[in-house]
């Protein structure tokens, strides 16, 4: 798989997404036992779903929203209208999640037992367990959907899996305590290391760390737009902005308190959950201006791919 | 909560594996505010020194280095045994005289003393509408038990109760010292 092809794919996805009418954020609010359903265009909270068990992980895809509640060890599948269509209790410490649309499969990390679960994307039936390093947390799919990456916090490494065969392809040592991670549109994997306050930039095919980039304190999540990487710095109440072309620093932006989950809209906005403030910041990736500040339920984490590019039913 | 109840929180617990920075799945937050009659400058003068938390009834004495500079440290001693007794070690990571606010983290504490991990906190003095001050103390932390299925004395509720108690005791002492606003 070439970078160029990834880039072309990413570009075509972006262009295809442009005419879409809406952009909805499904924000897991952990202490509030809720998902805030926010319309990023109108700024309205369209709904607030009751989600028991302290939800943190979230994934949107396949016409559904998946939530992970670590306290009750429960994964739920919601239709976009808020109806629960499936749920499962997983014996362990479920935390992060990612949805693989190509195989209609949900991946869930087990914070306490060094493994990943794979679930059927419709029924949430348990399909398989995959070996992982200690304390797997953030999960992300590559732009072409072929690779799953898992941040293994207490193993100081990431692991890459083939989504077609579920084989563990390789593990790559990174900085200290990787937690959140994401693939850039060009296919490179960016990993936030909360212990060493930097990003590891990885070539997933070669399994090599291409660069280590200093960011702020406790980098938590990463998202990409306008040729830039955006990293939430939990302990610093800032967003590090980095140019993808040469990995140089572009800016450091102020956020709310405890910025955590972060994701990019198809039209180049960055949404950041501010955990202490109970808000979602919406930032223009080009101008770097904050264009909206939306209220959420208590304790927004939004740990995962929490945006839906479309309208609610 | 007074010093005795803070200390009484200590019970015989099996040693928790000391995996650095390991934590539970749900970060907790606590915000406690109080209003006092004195103006912000006077209140900040009394509580704005990172090297002096002895205005808090649970803190018997303390030592520290670095004044109010970033990365300054302090050790809070919660008994008359000083460094030999129960203690909390903290580091300053943000300080503003102008905003009358400082932020710090716990670097070391036994869960028998305060049942939390990964704890950070801000203390802020703000003007109150109609005169006097609002003092806000807020913290973010995980429970004392880093693993799954915590025992009751180290669960989320225990962590919230302990931190809330610390803040309330400190802020109550300020009300006693500076008085309540008259209107």
Image (spheres, rainbow, N blue to C red):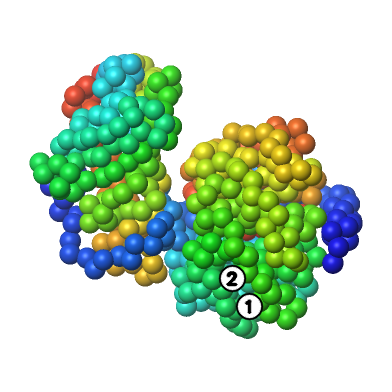
The residue located at (54%, 38%) in the rendering is A237
Q: Secondary structure at mark 2?
A: strand
Q: Are marks 1 and 2 in contact (CB under 8 Å)?
A: yes
Instruction: Tell me if I can see residue A36 in this picture.
Output: no
Side of B120 where B180 appears, left or right: left
Q: Mark 1 = which residue?
A: A119
Q: Quadrant of the N terminus of chain A?
A: bottom right
Q: How many badges with numbers are in the image?
A: 2
Side of B133 where A224 appears, left or right: right
Spot occupied by residue B31 in the image (x, y as percentages of width and height): 37, 40
Spot occupied by residue B114 in the image (x, y as percentages of width and height): 26, 51
Q: Is B176 above or below relative to A44? A: above
Spot occupied by residue A189 in the image (x, y as percentages of width and height): 70, 58
Lower position in the chain sequence, tag 1 or tag 2 = 2
Q: Is B172 above or below relative to A127? A: above
Side of B18 where A8 appears, left or right: right
Q: Chain of mark 2?
A: A
Of the pair A216 and A54, the residue shown nearer to us: A216
Side of A249 where A219 appears, left or right: left
Q: Mark 2 = which residue?
A: A108
Distance from Cα at disc 1 to Cα at disc 2: 8 Å
Spot occupied by residue B42 in the image (x, y as percentages of width and height): 29, 16
The residue located at (67%, 34%) in the rendering is A251
Of the pair A67 and A50, the residue shown nearer to us: A67
Q: Quadrant of the C terminus of chain A?
A: bottom right
Q: Is A140 above or below relative to B103? A: below
Q: Secondary structure at mark 1?
A: strand
The residue located at (63%, 77%) in the rendering is A118
Instruction: Tell me if I can see residue B19 in this picture.
Output: yes
* 10 Å crowding of disc 1: few (<14), some (14-19), many (20+): many
């Amino acid at each position: 798989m070439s970078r160029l092809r990834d880039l072309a794919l990413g570009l075509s996805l972006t262009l295809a997404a442009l005419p879409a009418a809406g952009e909805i954020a499904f924000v897991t609010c952990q202490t509030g036992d809720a998902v805030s359903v926010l319309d990023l265009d109108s700024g309205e909270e369209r709904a607030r779903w009751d989600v028991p068990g302290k939800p943190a992980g979230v994934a949107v895809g396949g016409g559904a929203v998946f939530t992970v509640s670590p306290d009750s060890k429960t994964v739920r599948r919601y239709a976009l209208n808020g109806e629960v269509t499936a749920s499962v209790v997983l014996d362990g410490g479920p935390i992060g999640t990612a949805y693989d649309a190509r195989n209609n499969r949900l991946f869930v990390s087990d914070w306490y037992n060094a493994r990943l679960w794979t679930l059927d994307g419709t029924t949430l039936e348990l399909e398989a367990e995959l070996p992982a390093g200690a304390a797997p947390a953030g999960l992300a799919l590559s732009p072409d959907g072929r690779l799953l990456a898992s941040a293994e916090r207490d193993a100081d490494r990431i692991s890459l899996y083939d989504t077609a065969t579920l084989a563990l392809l390789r593990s790559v040592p990174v900085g200290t305590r990787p937690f959140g991670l994401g693939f850039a549109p060009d296919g490179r994997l960016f990993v936030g290391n909360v212990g060493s306050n930097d990003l590891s930039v990885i070539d997933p095919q070669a399994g090599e760390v291409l660069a280590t980039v200093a960011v702020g304190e406790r980098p938590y999540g990463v998202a990409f737009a306008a040729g830039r990487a955006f990293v939430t710095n939990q302990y610093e109440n800032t967003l590090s902005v980095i140019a993808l072309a040469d990995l140089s620093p572009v800016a450091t932006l102020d956020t709310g308190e405890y910025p955590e989950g972060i994701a990019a809209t198809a039209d180049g906005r960055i949404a950041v959950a501010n955990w202490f403030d109970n808000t979602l910041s919406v930032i223009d990736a080009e101008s770097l201006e904050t264009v909206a500040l939306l209220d959420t339920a208590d304790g927004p984490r939004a740990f995962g791919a929490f945006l839906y590019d479309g309208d609610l039913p | 909560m007074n010093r005795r109840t803070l200390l009484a929180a200590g019970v015989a617990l099996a040693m928790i594996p000391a995996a650095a920075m390991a934590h539970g799945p749900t970060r907790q937050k606590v915000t406690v505010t109080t209003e006092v009659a004195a103006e912000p400058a006077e209140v900040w003068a009394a509580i704005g020194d990172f090297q002096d938390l002895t205005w808090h009834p649970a803190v018997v004495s303390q030592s520290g280095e670095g004044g109010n500079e970033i990365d300054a440290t302090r050790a809070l001693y919660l008994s008359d045994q000083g460094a030999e007794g129960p203690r909390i070690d903290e580091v300053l990571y943000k300080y503003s005289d102008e905003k009358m606010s400082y932020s710090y983290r716990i670097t070391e504490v036994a869960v028998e003393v305060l049942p939390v991990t990964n704890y950070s906190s801000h203390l802020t003095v703000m003007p109150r509408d109609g005169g006097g001050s609002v003092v806000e103390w807020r913290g973010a932390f995980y429970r004392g038990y880093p693993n799954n299925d915590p025992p009751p004395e180290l669960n989320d509720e225990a962590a919230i109760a302990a931190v809330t108690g610390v803040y309330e005791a400190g802020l109550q002492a300020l009300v006693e010292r500076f008085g309540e606003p008259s209107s």
